[in-house]
Amino acid sequence: MYRLFVTMTVITVINFASINAESYRIPLYETSSIRRYRRSEMDSIVLTNYEDFEYYGVIEIGTPPKKFKILFDTSYSGLWVLSKKCNVSQPACSEHNKYDNTKSLSYFRNGYPFNITYRHARMYGNLSIDTIRIGYFKLTSQTFGEIFNFYPTMFWSQWDGVLGMGYPALSLFNETPTPVAKNEIYEKIVAPTFSFYLNRKHNSHSNGELLLGDTNPSRYVGELTYVDVTRQKYWQFKMDKIQTEKNIFCSEGCQAIVDTGASVIGGPPQAIATLYREIGVNNGAVKCDEISNLPDISFVIGGKTFRLTGQDYVRKVTEDRCICMLQSIPYNDEVEWILGNIFIRRYYTVFDMKNNRVGFAMAKH
């Protein structure tokens, strides 16, 4: 799979016109690695920033509820968490929160076995049914995956599981469970829109938020630019072109996805190699004292230019080591470019399931 650092929730288009739901904000926390909403009282899922690589939020599973740090991934469809039955030989089994179905009064056995591939790791487990709480939203009888084992080991990150926010076609389970987003829509808990605001760790104690059911105008500047989803699998759209001072890529338009599970900007190897030469990348790194002089990279989407500077696409690892967050991806005839978190940090991003479109506006930091 050409995805770089990603995951997702299944979203199925149903009778959206009958939904009169409100919205809910989920604060996000950033991690390191390459109730019904009332308008007068906007709540959010906080996202935690882990070293400018990944962002995770907290959900609760079971009765009594247990907290889990979750990566919200728009390039995956499903929900899974580590299980108490996880193989003790795996470091992640001792270093992360785990779901214990014997401790939950609301657990129902499904037992359907599955194996999936996620981030190049093969994962094994069973489907289970329990109550899920996302902020003040409560979903009963939600099916999700319990992970017992995986190979090779992969949990060097801070989160305990993944909640996918992509289209149903991305489901990894052999037997597709009713996805979290679909359940929220059926129960009229949330309107069919969600949006992400991501911040840099050093800028604020609030690293970001996931807003379910609406957009938050206080988080962005100007108007949103929307483009239609071209293929209901990833959040995929047509990008007009990419331009720097010396080069133009995707000059006749190309397919791109916006991906909250990806840390980087991903593109065709030849294009990334050309960008590396223009930027002056050496073994993935650039000179830290040159960041302010690096060329801008402009992404033209829906006729509007979205510009990234060197401060956006270079990450300072140490005082004297800075890495370029552009990465080549294997050739794929479906998608050529991936716009990950370094793009979403700069541009507030809206995922509109009702109208099958994505929207962007300059984020307010």
Image (cartoon, rainbow, N blue to C red):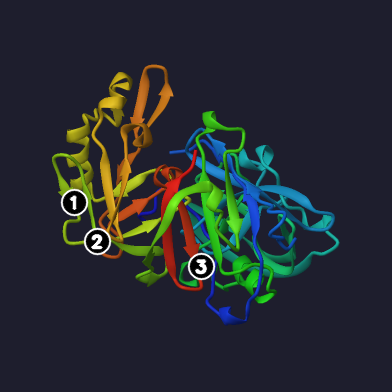
Out of 27 and 331, give the one closest to the viewer. 27
Out of 341 and 5, give the one closest to the viewer. 341
The amino acid on which the numbered mark 2 sits, given as a three-letter code, is Cys
Describe the element under mark 2 as helix, strand or loop. Answer: strand
Relative horizontal placement of residue 22, taking residue 55 as reference (left or right) = right
State the residue position of label 2. 254
Disc nearer the start of the sequence (3/2) = 3
Describe the element under mark 1 as helix, strand or loop. Answer: strand
Q: CA distance from mark 1 to mark 2?
A: 9 Å
State the residue position of label 1. 249
Relative horizontal placement of residue 365, taking residue 247 as reference (left or right) = right
CB-based contact (under 8 Å), mark 1 and mark 2:
yes
Describe the element under mark 3 as helix, strand or loop. Answer: loop
The amino acid on which the numbered mark 3 sits, given as a three-letter code, is Ser
- Residue 81 location (% of width, % of height): 64, 53
Residue in the picture at 22% in, 36% down: 276
